[in-house]
Amino acid sequence: MSKMIPALLALLAGIGLAIMATTPPLPRPAQSPANVFAAGRAMADIRVIAAKPHPGTSPEDAAVRAHLMRRLRAMGLETRESPVAGGAEAMAIFARWTGQTPAPLALHNVIGVLPGKDRTLPAVALMAHHDTVWGSPGAADDTTGVAALLDVVRAVKAGGTPPRDLIVLITDGEELGLDGARHFFTADPLHRRIGALINVEARGGGGRTTLFETSSDNGAAIALAAGAVRGPAGSSLAVFIYKVLPNDTDLSMALALPYTAYNYAFIGRPWLYHSPKATPDALDQGSLQDMGGQVLDLTRALLGARQLPGKAPDVVFFDAFGLTLVVYPAWAGWIMLALAAAGLKFAGRANWRAAAGGAGRMLALMVLAGVLLTAMNQLSLAPGAPNYYDRLAAIPRLEVMALASSVVAFLLTMAAWRPNPAAMAGAALPLLVLGVAGQVLAPTAAYVVVLPVMLAAGAIAAARGTGIAGQGLAVLVAALVAGYMLALGHQVMQGVGPNLPVVAVLPLALAGLAALPLWPSINRKHALVAAAVLLALAAGTAINVRLDPLADTVAVYSNDK
């Protein structure tokens, strides 16, 4: 049992770090000081705006626009409504929602400007959208964004006149094809005054608010954010992934322009996405606090900057468990890979047979995990085309399925293994190769492999000795890597898990590698029994998802799909 203690300590610490990384802050009450963002204050606007569904062109949305105009004017902003004609895509979406052939759609952006001390300086703009999909009150998407911006403006104004203008753009038609943003960034003269832009969005009803997209050449933009935002969340991995996904937000309409741009959103409580149950009471107010707090910090930094950040080479960045933003140049990944290779060479000491066996074990782990995750996902799918929103509602159970399948793969390939340092170094080799490929093809995203492999290589090299320092290093590395990979696995399962749970293979492999210097090896029979129990859990969960009736949270316009 004593041999298990270091591994258990690392596991418990890793779980704690993962919880810290994925848990939003507590919401501040409405009675908070005027210069801070308070979710309790912003909830008053959310309860008004999200009282009913308010898709673009609806009478309910007209009432929302009137409320927004009153709120902006009361804070001293120069306000106006800007009419926008809905395009062909908007007409088609509207017809799909309602089953009716629509008349020409008349949309309206709401625009406000808080004057700054020097109105000749490039302005800072904040953007969200006020329309919802058909049938959803949209307390998160995007009422949270709208209400967050209102309280951010209030807090900025409470601090006195800002150094430069602050523009508030609350678009219409985002859910109908981005027409409001398209019109503003192509036809509204005010867009030429913008120097920096922050957009806020939501896909779900909770979770950490994350910086998931930026303008290109983001080095200076991230440097400013890293120095300004308290309790940050975001990563260059998310930025890279979002670039290759076929998804759009209002910010997509602005990225071709020479702005410094940031995009924030949360995706927790995914079953509430476009749901009729996305009500104010169902919203995680901690997520609202997270969004408003980060955006207020960044807005103040941009408003107060002597010169807004311009173009600089893209950088690697990620939050260290929500405590701070780690930032470094992409080329530093090559140094990390060199250090990892040196550590693994030291650990291997020309014992190539053991290293080859270790590499085979790691490849077996990844292949087996991929097979199990794919098979369980297929088992969870009912015949016919799945309802997208029903799959979102199943994500918590799909995460259980994926975690159980991943542990099964680890138990079957690694649990009874007693690797020496050379074998552990061999286990790292496939991931080192993957890190090199990532550094070549996607240097700002490769850190997710490169950094853990470097840390694990150090712990593996230290495992050649028997001292307490080496074991302490192994516990620290295992806790850090396991914590980050648990959080990453949770995030990627929320993002793409319903369709692609096989993405959990990479976090599993990296966490497993970091655990090897501590792994005490367990009896093969015990490992097989545990694997059988967990496999039954994974299969039972998949069958439960397959047989479960359509969730009552699905978007109303998807009920026939």
Image (spheres, helix red, strand yellow):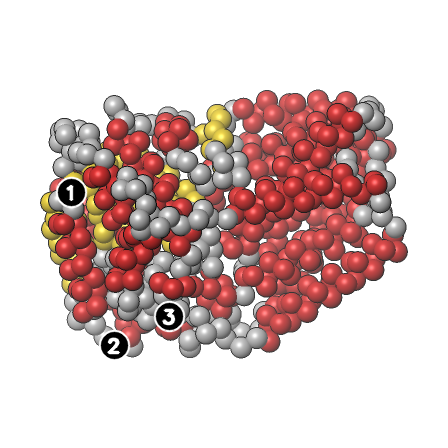
Q: Which residue is drawn at 38% across and 64% down?
A: 281
| Position of residue 468 measured from the top left corner of the image (x, y, whole percent) | 78, 27
Image quadrant where one finds the N terminus: top right
Q: What element carries label 2?
A: loop
Q: Is mark 3 on a helix, strand or loop?
A: loop
Q: Which mark is residue 100?
A: 2
**Disc 1 versus disc 3: distance between alpha carbons?**
33 Å
For the question of whether residue 376 can be seen, the reply is yes
For marks 3 and 2, the one nearer the N-term is 2
Q: Residue 276 carries which label?
A: 3
Kindly identify the amino acid type of the residue bearing the numbered disc 2: Gln
Instruction: Tell me the crowding category of disc 2: few under 14, some 14 to 19, or many 20 or more residues within 10 angstroms, Cα based.
Output: few
Q: In this view, does 241 lie to the left or right of 311?
A: right
Judge whether 168 appears above or below 349 on screen. Answer: below
Name the residue nearer the viewer: 72 or 189. 72
Q: Name the residue under label 1.
A: 113
Name the residue nearer the viewer: 408 or 353. 408
Kindly identify the amino acid type of the residue bearing the numbered disc 3: Pro
Instruction: Tell me the crowding category of disc 3: few under 14, some 14 to 19, or many 20 or more residues within 10 angstroms, Cα based.
Output: many
Q: Nearer the viewer, mark 3 or mark 2?
A: 3
For marks 1 and 2, the one nearer the N-term is 2
| Position of residue 303 measured from the top left corner of the image (x, y, whole percent) | 25, 32
How many numbered callouts?
3
